Image: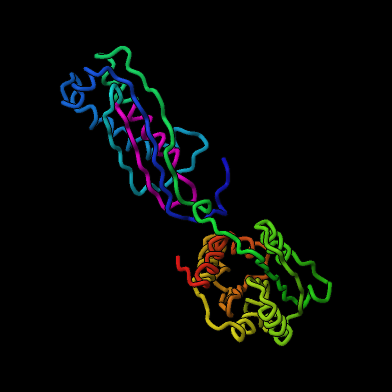
Amino acid sequence: MRSITRKTETLRTAEAESRVWVKEEILGRLRQNDVPKKDVLAVARCAGVMAAKKTSELIPYCHPVPIDWVEIGFGFEPSQLVIRATVEAIAKTGVEMEALTAVSAAALTVYDMLKPLDAQIEIMSTKLLSKTGGKSGFKEKIPSGFKAAVIVTSDGTAKGVRQDKSGRIIEERLRGFGIETSYEIFPDEKPLILSALKKYCEQGVQLIFTTGGTGLGPRDVTVEAAREVVDREIPGIMEAARSFGQRRTPYAMLSRGVAGQKGNTLIVNLPGSSAGVEESLDAIFPAVLHAYKMMRGMGH
């Protein structure tokens, strides 16, 4: 079973379809509810809804999903009953299997209830029609010439007595998106951090990540430096990161990191721990890149 621990919850939807071949005469009787086993479509609808909710019990590698809505509909075409299911959930993983299971169960129910009348009834096809949600549903285009910078703030790392991990994680993640990235290490000295932030803003770097200096230690001053540079804060970015982290460790609430805008540059303070950096990036990427579309006045 694949781990979805690092995924974020988003609205997930899926629509699936099954087609059942039935003799035209029987199909007409079905439409009139003139068959020995009454209410075939009503029973099939119930079966589809129940199956959607039990998908994880039927398909071994499916995760349990808190389903918010299931809709089963029927359509009539020449010699075909068309069954469609729509499923919605706010979850970490998609609901396409729930939709497919729903139409499959509904089709099997129709088959079972009509087989005494039509020995040639056949479930012809079952397929996924559409799905939305997850990070794949929120793809952001990287602007041409986009540049980023990673600033590591740590006395120990600057002295060479501690190896940097968090900064390299950020750098690797950014390069995975094809983003050209600069990388520097500074001690926990506010004037140095302030100067580096201003330098990158003046150079037109669009995204600056800092890592370290967001806690409660006497030398943690990265947040104060960032606040002096940004024109306006964007609280939701770090709210999302802390909320995501809080569900994994209670210490996430102690991070003071801020995110803000300086002209066309976005500055984001991430924690110093490698786990905190990974969780924060999982929480905000790639959606944070949508900020640049908004900065250009293009809205959502």
Start-end of magenta stretch: 81-107
Q: Residue at horizontal 78%, vertical 75%?
A: 156
Percent coordinates x, y for residue 59 in the rendering:
47, 33
Quadrant location of the C terminus?
bottom left
Q: Quadrant of residue 145?
A: bottom right
Magenta stretch: residue 103 in it?
yes
Q: Is residue 151 left or right of residue 14?
A: right
Residue 267 visible from this viewpoint? yes
Q: Position of residue 223 (x, y in %)?
A: 62, 80
Q: Determine whether, in the image, residue 114 is placed left or right of residue 193.
A: left
Frontmost residue, 100 versus 279: 100
| Residue 188 placement (x, y as % from top left) | 73, 81
- Nearest the camera: 31 or 299? 299
Taking the view exactly as shown, the residue that stands out farthest to the right is 160
Nearest the viewer among 231 and 6 is 231
Q: Quadrant of the N terminus?
A: top right
Is 283 drawn above or below residue 157 in the view shown? above
Where residue 49 appears, as percent x and y from the top left, is 32, 38
Is 38 situated above or below 255? Answer: above
Residue at horizontal 76 percent and vertical 73 percent from the top: 184
Q: Across the whole image, how many numbered discs are drawn on residues?
A: 0
Q: Is residue 150 above or below residue 17?
A: below
| Magenta stretch holds residue 197 | no
Quarter where residue 202 is shown: bottom right
